[in-house]
Image: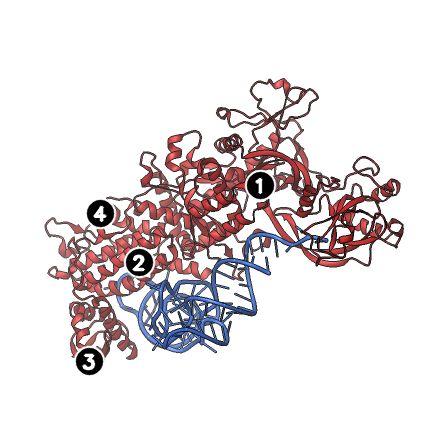
Chain colours: A red, B blue
RNA sequence: GGGCGCGUAGCUCAGCUGGUAGAGCGCCUCGCUUACACCGAGGAAGUCGGCGGUUCGAGUCCGUCCGCGCCCACCA
């Protein structure tokens, strides 16, 4: 590829340091990105340039806490977008000499994977089923799907999950590699792998020892389809149609009141009635008991500040449990518990007249309730409304308990973000991490982190301030990290929840359903006086909130942990500030009273061209692979890099096109510059020095921008410089001098040196953004010349590159050269002659000051404009820096 | 209802600490000038969302309103 001497006139010169030219004919006419991408990917993997060196000190290290993508999610342009942002920083830091730690993990445990596996194989997990070692699963056919899903054991189910996630991870990895992410693949992990399991369980042991995690039996937000507890962070409000139902209650001792409810199906679960203490309409009833219609249950009437006199009728029924406020009233007023909604979302079979279900007319109550028992909430609501139309059900004798018709409304209802039916509050035993009592510390630690852009901290702050419950970390699922706990069983086989048995840290990871706690034998499992395993698993965030510690091998390798924790940078999406960022900060606070990282860079999300957020649920997601095919990896990265952090960005193919065009331009400019040959000599000519001075200023600004995570303005500036100061101007102005075949041309070597400096520095400035094309051009000459095979291991441009280059004699000479040249081109355009047409003669008019600073660059301007002769005319009426072209005479068009 | 962000040429966006509007794409005109026609030169195009205010001067600061997006809260 290195053609030794392409200019025969120089062949006999003695040995001197030379800028060797390449033979442009040895390069393809057009840049073939697909070939280059494959070649450089292979070269990078074979080299060690992306590898973290544990021997180097912490101060030289830059640690990235890479987001582990949800492996079972589909490839999304948003991935390409935000992961490119991270790679920009990684590549920049590496070029500044940092020892970059850039791992990749896969978040494979959790509900998304389970759902995908259930659908793909058409199976369900039955924890009681025995393991089938030879079970072969295959993708379910349409015919299979007509049958009920196959029940498989928990280990079989987990195997199926692992199989599917392995495949998903392969496609993600292929995408990352295609994009050119400079990941050190030796640090790949899965949140379900043994190391992550160990660290998650180790975290639990540490929290337990510190008294920060405990199990509680309490009403918990519950998804009735997944039959699983849900944390506050996973809630989502959805607008749903509903209706106010006005229902008349009797008051014990005489009187009637009408409550308004959207959940008439919970009437049987009513345990109280409340109104605002200042509400004159109801003040007289406080302390008495109300009698529910249909079921004739007496319930206390009490005053509560939380009741809003403006809403409904101002008085409402408290049920176990209609919503979060019901839970508060139930606790504060020590109301009865009548839990009717079961874990599966159906109403329990209960007997009025029995303990806890007193009724003034049990027989009638049971007759009504019989129609509701076993029904799901939606069905029960319809039936309840009909029952309430029965005058015989009235508690007062005033006719049907339902007063008037239901009044339709639209209201927000809490859903599990991945769920299909509204959440219910169901009393269950769950593990909680204490967070509420650490609110102030969480705010302080969050503020210690530098947020990019800064206003993203506000989201964290709002979330933390509004936190209303501790973190429920137990999940009634299968594919995840087991909670490492057993419970002793007493003589009657009851679990003693107060004295859980924890494993030794050295034994981790454990699966309590198969491992046996110390001091017990396997035969004692589920036996009286034996032990019983916790079957729940952790919330997936419990593990992924430990990604910095997973990478640092916390608890296993103290030296490595000290070197990698806390990390420098957490890149992530704005949608998971309340989960991933929040929980990670919480874990680092509770475990180490530390921040998990010093910086957090929050990317915006991707919208479709109609400005709608691109998301799976909206069905407007496109796969990024065709974009890579069409616009090249560098072109796609260009699009991602041109968006500032935190800014939502439209998927606009025009921007990809610009990126691809830039790649082509770099290819061609590189080809031209490196085809020029000359002695290696200092940069001496005025124009060359003026260009170098401009370039130097660009370098200094670029470094500042990158250090403050401002990659988008940086790219814009470098690109604009490349185009307007390099290819369109300097390169054209210096071209003839650089190509001069006269060995005595003193400026030739200076021009070639400056062109090479320009290309060299610009390649390095572009390298984080466009790793493939920059590496390609770098490889043609600089790799050998600088004995640095990869531009990505080359130093980030700095003052060093400009050492020994004198400042231009006139600070404005570069601008004046360009302005004068453009003025001549404009004269040609006005005369409608081609830009290449020779100029017989012309007069350049400008004020004396401008003409003076043009002097040093005049010959280059005249050569570029193809002027054979010229005159200078001082004209003080022309403003500084402007030129007028007069008396231009153009040569006749010549052939050839 | 609260918070955050945004509203600049047809489109996508840039405009730092206030000083008389910028880029690319698209459009129109011209040009094959041996790095590049995946190019170059030139041109048309904006009352910087509206209204007030501060200032000698505001896209840039303050207030207010309108529109868009996102987050949170509303669940009787």
Do we see residue A576 in this rendering? no
User: Distance between the Cα atoms at labels 4 and 1?
Assistant: 61 Å
Check disc 1 and report the residue beneath it.
Answer: A470
Chain bearing mark 4: A
- Dot 4: few (<14), some (14–19), or many (≥20) neighbours within 10 Å? some
Q: Are marks 4 and 1 in contact (CB under 8 Å)?
A: no
- In-image side of B26 versus A240 (left or right): left
Residue A876 is labelled as 3
User: Distance between the Cα atoms at labels 3 and 4?
Assistant: 49 Å
Q: Secondary structure at mark 3?
A: loop
Check disc 2 and report the residue beneath it.
Answer: A668
Give coordinates of residue A49: x percent, y percent.
Answer: 33, 41
Give the mark nearest the N terminus, 2 or 1. Answer: 1
Q: Secondary structure at mark 2?
A: helix
Give coordinates of residue A96: x percent, y percent.
Answer: 30, 46
Q: Same chain for labels 3 and 1? Say yes or no.
A: yes
Give the mark nearest the N terminus, 3 or 1. Answer: 1
């Amino acid at each position: 590829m290195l053609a030794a001497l392409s200019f025969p006139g120089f062949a006999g010169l003695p040995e001197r340091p030379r800028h060797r030219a390449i033979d442009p004919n040895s390069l393809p006419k057009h840049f073939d990105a697909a070939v280059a991408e494959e070649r450089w990917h292979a070269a990078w993997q074979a080299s060690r340039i992306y590898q973290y060196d544990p021997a180097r000190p912490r101060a030289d290290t830059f640690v990235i806490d890479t987001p582990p993508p949800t492996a079972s999610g589909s490839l999304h342009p948003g991935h390409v977008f935000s992961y490119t942002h991270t790679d920009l920083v990684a590549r920049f830091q590496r070029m500044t000499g940092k020892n970059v730690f850039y791992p990749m993990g896969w978040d494979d445990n959790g509900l998304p994977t389970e759902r995908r596996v259930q659908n793909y194989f058409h199976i369900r997990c039955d924890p009681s089923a025995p393991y089938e070692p030879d079970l072969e699963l295959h993708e379910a056919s349409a015919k299979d799907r007509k049958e009920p899903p196959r029940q498989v054991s928990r280990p079989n189910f987990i195997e199926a999950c692992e199989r599917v996630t392995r495949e998903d991870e392969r496609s993600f990895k292929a995408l990352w590699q295609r994009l050119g992410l400079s990941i050190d693949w030796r640090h790949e992990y899965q949140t379900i792998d043994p190391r992550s399991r160990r660290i998650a369980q180790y975290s639990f042991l540490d929290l337990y020892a510190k008294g920060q995690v405990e199990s509680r039996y309490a009403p918990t937000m519950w998804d009735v389809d997944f039959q699983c507890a849900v944390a506050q962070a996973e809630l989502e409000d959805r607008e749903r149609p509903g209706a106010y139902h006005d229902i008349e209650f009797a008051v014990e001792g005489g009187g009637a009141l009408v409550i308004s409810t959207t959940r008439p199906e919970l009437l049987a679960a009513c345990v109280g009635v409340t109104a605002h203490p200042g509400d004159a309409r109801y003040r007289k009833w406080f302390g008495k008991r109300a009698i529910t219609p249909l079921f004739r249950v007496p319930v206390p009437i009490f005053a509560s500040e939380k009741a809003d006199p403006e809403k409904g009728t101002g008085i409402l029924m408290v049920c176990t449990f209609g919503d979060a406020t019901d839970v508060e009233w139930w606790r504060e007023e020590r109301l009865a518990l009548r839990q009717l909604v079961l874990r599966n979302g159906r109403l329990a079979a209960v007997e009025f007249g029995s303990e806890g279900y007193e009724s003034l007319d049990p027989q009638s109550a049971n007759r009504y309730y019989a129609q509701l028992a076993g029904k799901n909430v939606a069905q029960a609501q319809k039936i309840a409304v009909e029952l309430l139309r029965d005058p015989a059900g009235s508690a007062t004798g005033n006719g049907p308990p339902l007063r008037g018709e239901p009044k339709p409304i639209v209201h927000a209802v809490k859903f599990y973000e991945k769920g299909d039916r509204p959440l219910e509050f169901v009393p269950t035993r769950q593990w909680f991490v204490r967070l509420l009592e650490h609110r102030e510390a969480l705010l302080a630690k969050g503020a210690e982190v530098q947020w990019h852009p800064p206003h993203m901290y506000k989201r964290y702050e709002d979330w933390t301030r509004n936190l209303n419950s501790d973190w429920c970390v137990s999940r009634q699922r299968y594919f995840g990290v087991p909670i490492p706990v057993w419970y002793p069983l007493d003589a009657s086989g009851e679990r003693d929840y107060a004295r859980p048995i924890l494993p030794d840290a050295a034994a981790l990871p454990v699966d309590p359903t198969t491992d046996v706690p110390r001091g017990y034998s396997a035969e004692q499992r589920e036996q009286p006086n034996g032990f019983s395993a916790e079957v729940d698993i952790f919330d997936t965030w419990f593990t992924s909130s430990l990604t910095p510690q997973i990478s640092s091998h916390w608890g296993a390798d103290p030296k490595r942990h000290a070197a990698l924790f806390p990390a420098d940078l957490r890149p992530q999406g704005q949608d998971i500030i309340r989960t991933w960022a929040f929980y990670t900060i919480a874990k680092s606070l509770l475990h180490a009273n530390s921040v998990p990282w010093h910086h957090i860079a929050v990317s915006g999300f991707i919208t479709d061209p109609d400005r709608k957020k691109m998301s799976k649920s909206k069905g407007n997601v496109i796969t990024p692979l065709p974009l890579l095919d069409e616009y090249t990896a560098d072109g796609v990265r260009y699009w991602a890099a041109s968006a500032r952090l935190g800014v939502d960005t439209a998927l606009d193919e025009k921007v990809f096109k610009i990126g691809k065009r830039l790649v082509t331009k770099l290819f061609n400019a590189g080809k031209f510059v490196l085809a020029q040959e000359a002695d290696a000599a200092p940069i001496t000519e005025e124009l060359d020095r003026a260009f170098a001075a401009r370039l130097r200023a660009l370098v200094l600004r670029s470094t500042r921008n990158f250090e403050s995570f401002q990659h988008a303005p940086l790219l814009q500036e470098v690109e604009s410089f490349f185009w307007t100061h390099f290819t369109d101007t300097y390169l054209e102005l210096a071209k003839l001098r650089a190509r001069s075949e006269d060995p005595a041309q003193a400026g030739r070597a200076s021009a070639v040196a400056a062109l090479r400096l320009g290309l060299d520095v610009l390649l390095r400035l572009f390298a984080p953004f466009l790793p493939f094309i920059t590496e390609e051009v770098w490889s043609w000459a600089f790799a050998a010349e600088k004995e640095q095979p990869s531009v990505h291991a080359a130093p980030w441009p700095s003052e060093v590159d400009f050492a020994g280059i004198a400042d231009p004699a006139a600070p404005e000479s570069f601008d004046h050269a360009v302005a004068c040249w453009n003025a001549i081109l404009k004269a040609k355009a006005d005369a409608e002659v081609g830009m290449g047409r020779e100029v017989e003669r012309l007069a350049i008019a400008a004020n004396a000051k401008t003409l003076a600073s043009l002097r040093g660059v005049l010959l280059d301007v005249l050569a570029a404009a193809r002027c054979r002769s010229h005159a200078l005319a001082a004209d003080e009426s022309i403003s500084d820096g402007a030129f007028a072209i007069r008396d231009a005479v153009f040569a006749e068009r010549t052939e050839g």
